[in-house]
Amino acid sequence: MMKLYDTLSRSLREVTPRDGRTYRFYCCGPTVYGPAHIGNFRTFVLQDVFRRTIELGGLPTRHVRNLTDVDDKTIRDSQAAGQTLTEFTHYWTDRFHRDCARLNLLTPHEEPGAVDHIPQQIALIETLMEKGHAYRSDDGSVYYKVSSFDSYGRLSHLDRRELRYGTAVADDEYEKDSVADFALWKARKPEDGDNWWDSPWGPGRPGWHLECSAMCREYLGDTFDLHSGGVDLIFPHHENEIAQSEAATGCHMADHWFHLTHLLVDGGKMSKSLGNFYTLDQIEAAGFTGNELRYVLISAHYRQPLNFVARDADGKETFPALAGARHALERIAKFDAALRARIPMEQGLSSDATGYDQLRGLPAEERGGFAAAFDGLLNDLNTPEALGQVFSALKEVKPAELDAEAARRERRGLHFVLEALGLRVPELKEESVEVPEAIRDLAERRWAARTAKDWASADVLRAELAAAGWEMKDGREGYELSPKG
RNA sequence: GGCGGGAUAGCCAAGUGGUAAGGCCGAGGUCUGCAAAACCUCUACCGCGGGUUCGAUUCCCGCUCCCGCCUCCA
């Protein structure tokens, strides 16, 4: 049984499906108006580990993650790009999906977009109007009346009277009865262009918070198991979702609220102006993989800030954290290969049950030395604890001493926790680089000298290879050539 | 000002009322002609000051500093 911190009750609570069969949860997804950054992906990756842990533990899930495809920024930037809103958001949605695949994120069961759910959102507003929780202003916008919802502020623990901000109020907000009220429907403005829809209150578009309330209800019902997002969404986004949904349905919205702390870069907030705003494309351009980034993103507990170190001590952008992740993952790969070597080939092929679906529900006693690692995930999704236990097991388990059956058990245990973390075992580098004829010749001559125990010549030839940019590593039966990094 | 989260080795980062996992880097060693790889070993007075306790890094109070939210940012 998994335990997870709940923002609303401020306590650790069990992860249990209210219907006893399927765990149904909603994650606030990206706004598709540009590339997602690694901070966004910290959230999505940890949500993915959460889902994997539940499913591998034997409990099916229903995972809904929305795409915010209409708001001020998407409208503004689509116009700047000379594209329709749909063309523009589809482009960035594809990019997002590509990044997700490279980070080994499971695809949500539903991925609804706001634009495709306008009727549901209008229906929700109508209900709120009928129940007296919303009002139309003179310009045709509709606002949620915060004072009509008694428990407003319960999630963020903000007292309603503290929600007044004394500073400048945006021009268009004079229509509201109270500054805390928020838009359910935004009246059409000239700069919206073609991006408007008809409604009982006039042309316009839905407010941001509304889409999640409407789509949660559409796909998960009035009450579901868990709702998740970054900590910044606690207020006002999730607070407003609760106000909308619960006022409309009379039911409490979600049993559990799962919020993820933000990523820091080099000890500070990520921002475009500081030049530390990284996308997966940039990480890959620097020679690292999504798998390596994923390792870094799960290396801290989700409720702690994670400091992504992009620059080394000299201030150079060498991504030491990713380089460390590469080394750590290679150790896992070598261990995995050592286990595989203990398993006879025909068995290895036929019973190589280390895929995600094959491992679902693997009993705890069949996880070998890696049982403790998975247990770490059950304890408030403690990914660093799980990683620590993986490496501890790597020391304890000696592949060379295992028979085939034990090796298969350990290998299943290892892959069980790796699948939960969503980490792939990297391919160990094979000799696949093109070696020029001249280099191959030098290497052959050195190998001959070495075999003849002519150390002086061998060292000279090694130096020549090095000068040409090649590294020669001696093995028991032969040598390996690799370009110098 | 309000609410919340932090401060653990060079870096990253778990954890516990009885003197602290793991990863990266570094050092030493075994092995190998050398190198590489592999394996072994080593590196922390747990922000500061009080208090509770037989005993606190872990609980309580105060302080300093950092971070997030408090006007659509994961």
Image (cartoon, rainbow, N blue to C red):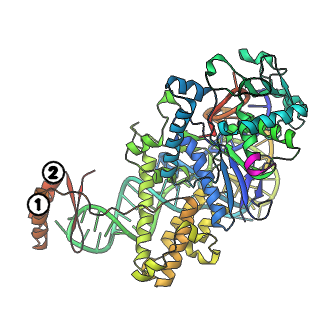
Give me the disc on residue A395: none
Q: Residue at x 83, y 23 (%)?
A: A136
Q: Position of residue A203 (x, y in %)?
A: 72, 23
Mark 2: secondary structure:
loop
Look at the image and say whether residue A219 sits in the magenta stretch.
Answer: yes
Q: Position of residue A285 (x, y in %)?
A: 38, 42
Q: Residue at x 55, y 72 (%)?
A: A413
Q: In the picture provided, is B35 more to the left or to the right than A216?
A: left
Look at the image and say whether residue A360 sits in the magenta stretch.
Answer: no
Which quarter of the figure has residue B4?
Answer: top right
Give me the disc on residue A442: 1
Decide: is A184 above or below A396.
above
The one nearer the camera, A183 or B73, is A183
Decide: is A75 above or below A370.
above
10 Å crowding of disc 2: few (<14), some (14-19), many (20+): few
Give me the disc on residue A468: 2
**Residue A167 visible in the snapshot:** no
Which stretch appears magenta?
Answer: A217-222
The one nearer the camera, B20 or A299, is A299
Chain of the residue under the numbered disc 2 shown in the image:
A
Q: Disc 1 and disc 2: Cα gap in Å?
A: 10 Å
Q: Position of residue A105 (x, y in %)?
A: 55, 53
Mark 1: secondary structure:
helix
Asked if disc 1 and disc 2 are in contact, CB closer than 8 Å, the reply is yes
Q: Position of residue B73 (x, y in %)?
A: 62, 34
